[in-house]
Amino acid sequence: MALLMTTTTVHGLLAPDAYHRAENVRIASVSQLEFTVMSYASAAHVMAFAAKTMQCPYMLDGDNPIRQAYMHLKTLPEFAGATDC
């Protein structure tokens, strides 16, 4: 599971169809997830051009934690228009 969207890097470079993957998803507490969003130029690249640690609410009776992380990302303005891949 990942999100695909065109992204501009912090250095101003355009990364068309960048591949954003939630990694190291962990249950931080009974009500919170922590994870790192790793951004790659494509699914085939092994070196990320960006990494961002994020948190979101965790619902014990909800989907699995990884899916919950992706659902949270899709609510954020920075991932508006991203497509699932």
Image (cartoon, helix red, strand yellow):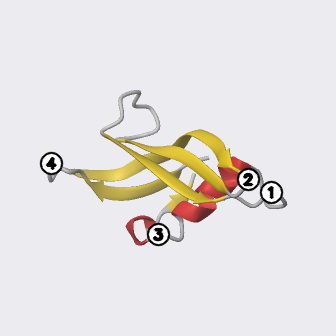
The disc labelled 2 sits on which kind of residue? Val
Q: Nearer the viewer, mark 4 or mark 1?
A: 1
> How much space separates mark 2 and mark 1, taking CA atoms?
7 Å
**34 and 85: which is toward the camera:** 34
Q: In the shown orientation, is residue 16 left or right of residue 23?
A: left
Out of 16 and 29, give the one closest to the viewer: 29
Question: Which residue is identified by label 4?
Answer: 11
Q: Which mark lies nearer to you, 2 or 3?
A: 2
Bin the neighbour count of mark 4 within 10 Å (Cα to Cα): few under 14, some 14-19, many 20 and up: few
Mark 2 touching mark 3, by CB under 8 A?
A: no
**Mark 4 and mark 3: Cα distance apart in space:** 21 Å
**Circle 1 sits on which residue?**
60
Read off the residue under disc 3: 76
Tell which circle, 4 or 1, labels the residue nearer the N-terminal end: 4
Measure the C-alpha gap from mark 4 to mark 1: 39 Å
Q: Which amino acid does the dot numbered 1 rest on?
A: Leu
